[in-house]
Image: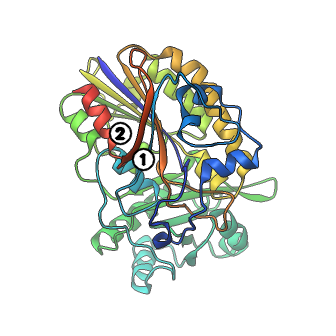
């Protein structure tokens, strides 16, 4: 069985794209370079061995004359700098029209319809905001009114935050499903509705990552559909299931941290996942597929560190990923194609807390294939091409 494994290090961009100013970014943004500089270098021997340090100068990431992987810089074709756009393009779908953003908050008629159909009584915020900041700012009012906190960002997102000790998690998910339907019916072109549950921990509002859910627009046909439709297996780990709105996925499992995502990826590679338990169709979980795709998103770099301007934590997260590569790489077989890449940037060392429009690295490894420099590739969809050439 031919198998491909794709690990997306969420937001690990490597330099501004030429059109970055159109996306309100500065040419100086370079997530990985700045994280390396802030931490006085990173201890990532496996990523170095694969050739990451050969792509450009990253402090502390060594170059190698004998890279075990092929490596390249990829330039995004799609018009965006968000998770959905990046992942869809990785899977072969180009988004030529950017998703809509709402820098002044959402239209009155949209909010009124949301309040009416959810029967939530009212909402708080309705403005662009940092998620951690907005729940701290409005937590007391949320408790007194029980109104959900609705906010957006520079990305195309409709985010709903509630304290799940006050509003049940199931109610939050239901409100998100209602918002998704309203947005789709009204052609608001919003990429994602995001459930942002939190609790009060040690006296402070704290988001609960494992219970976050994303409700994306349904993508048109992608590589995932092509693999599934021809009898293959597509295992989504992390928020992959949400990003693709379940389209083209046969098995899925959510994660609460990068550590959990990496451990599950390793189990998937070793064929140790309980596939019957995580299959969408329990009666046909494709026990003997002709091909398999394991697709993992590691979100901590973006959610916990990029958006919170925490370059130290960002560096530690990359080092954690590298440590797991010490187990992942030896577990791969000759029939495995292993790819590491990113979906956009989120530079914690430049002004702002939003995503940045950046190029991304890609590392392509197979035990029998020689490593080397692929230069600059136009399109994240090159990943889909590599996988199709490998699987089909």
Q: Residue at x 56, y 78 (%)?
A: 127
Spot the residue most to the left.
230
Image coloring type:
rainbow
How many numbered marks, from 0 up?
A: 2
Dot 2: what SS?
Answer: helix
Q: Is residue 1 above or below residue 63?
A: above
The answer to whether marks 1 and 2 mark residues whose Cβ atoms lie closer than 8 Å is yes
Residue linked to disc 1? 74
x and y, in percent, of residue 345 in the image: 54, 54
Looking at the rendering, in which quadrant would you find the N terminus?
top left
Q: Residue at x 28, y 71 (%)?
A: 185
59 or 85: nearer the viewer: 59
Residue linked to disc 2? 383
9 or 171: nearer the viewer: 9
x and y, in percent, of residue 221 in the image: 22, 48
Tag on residue 380? none
Quadrant of res 351? bottom right
19 or 138: nearer the viewer: 19
Q: Is residue 171 above or below residue 123?
A: above
Q: Residues within 10 Å of mark 1 (few under 14, many from 20)?
A: many
Quadrant of res 290? top left
Q: Residues within 10 Å of mark 2 (few under 14, many from 20)?
A: many
Q: Who comes first in sequence, dot 1 or dot 2?
A: 1
Looking at the rendering, in which quadrant would you find the C terminus?
top left
Residue 253 seen in the current view: no
Which callout, 1 or 2, points to the residue nearer the camera?
A: 1
Between the C-alphas of marks 1 and 2, the distance is: 9 Å
360 or 196: nearer the viewer: 360
Spot the residue most to the right.
202
Q: Is residue 118 above or below residue 346?
A: below
Left or right of 173, for residue 42: right
x and y, in percent, of residue 283 in the image: 26, 26
């Amino acid at each position: 069985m031919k198998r491909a494994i794709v690990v997306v290090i969420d937001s690990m961009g490597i330099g501004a794209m030429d059109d970055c100013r159109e996306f309100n970014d500065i040419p100086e943004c370079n997530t990985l370079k700045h994280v390396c500089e802030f931490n006085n270098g990173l201890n990532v021997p496996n990523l170095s061995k694969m050739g990451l340090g050969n792509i450009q100068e990253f402090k502390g990431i060594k170059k190698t004359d004998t890279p075990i992987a092929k490596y390249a810089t990829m330039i995004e074709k799609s018009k965006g700098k968000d998770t959905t756009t990046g992942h869809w393009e990785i899977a072969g779908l180009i988004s030529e029209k950017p998703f809509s953003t709402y820098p002044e908050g959402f239209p009155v008629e949209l909010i009124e319809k949301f309040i009416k159909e959810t029967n939530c009584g009212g909402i708080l915020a309705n403005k662009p905001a940092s998620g951690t900041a907005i729940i701290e700012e409005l937590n007391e009012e949320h408790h007194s009114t029980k109104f959900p906190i609705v906010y957006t960002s520079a990305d195309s997102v409709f985010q709903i935050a509630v304290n799940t000790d006050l509003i049940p998690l199931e109610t939050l998910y239901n409100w998100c499903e209602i918002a998704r339907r309203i947005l789709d019916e009204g052609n608001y072109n919003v990429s994602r509705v995001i459930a942002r549950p939190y609790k009060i921990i040690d006296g402070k509002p704290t988001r609960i990552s494992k219970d976050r859910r994303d409700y994306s627009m349904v993508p048109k046909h992608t590589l995932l559909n092509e693999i599934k439709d021809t009898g293959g297996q597509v295992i989504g780990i992390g928020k992959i299931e949400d990003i693709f709105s379940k389209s083209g996925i046969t098995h899925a499992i959510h994660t609460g941290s990068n550590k959990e995502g990496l451990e599950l990826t390793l189990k998937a590679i070793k064929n140790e996942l309980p596939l019957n338990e995580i299959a969408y169709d329990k009666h046909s979980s494709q026990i003997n597929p002709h091909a398999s795709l394991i697709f993992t998103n590691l979100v901590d770099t973006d959610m916990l560190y990029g958006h919170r301007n925490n370059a130290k934590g960002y560096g530690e997260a990359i080092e954690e990923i590298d440590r797991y590569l010490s187990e992942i790489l030896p577990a791969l077989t000759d029939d495995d194609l292993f790819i590491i890449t990113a979906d956009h940037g989120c530079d914690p060392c430049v002004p702002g807390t939003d995503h940045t429009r950046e190029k991304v690295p890609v590392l392509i490894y197979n035990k029998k294939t020689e490593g080397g420099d692929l230069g600059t590739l136009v399109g994240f969809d090159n990943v889909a091409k590599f996988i199709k050439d490998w699987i089909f």
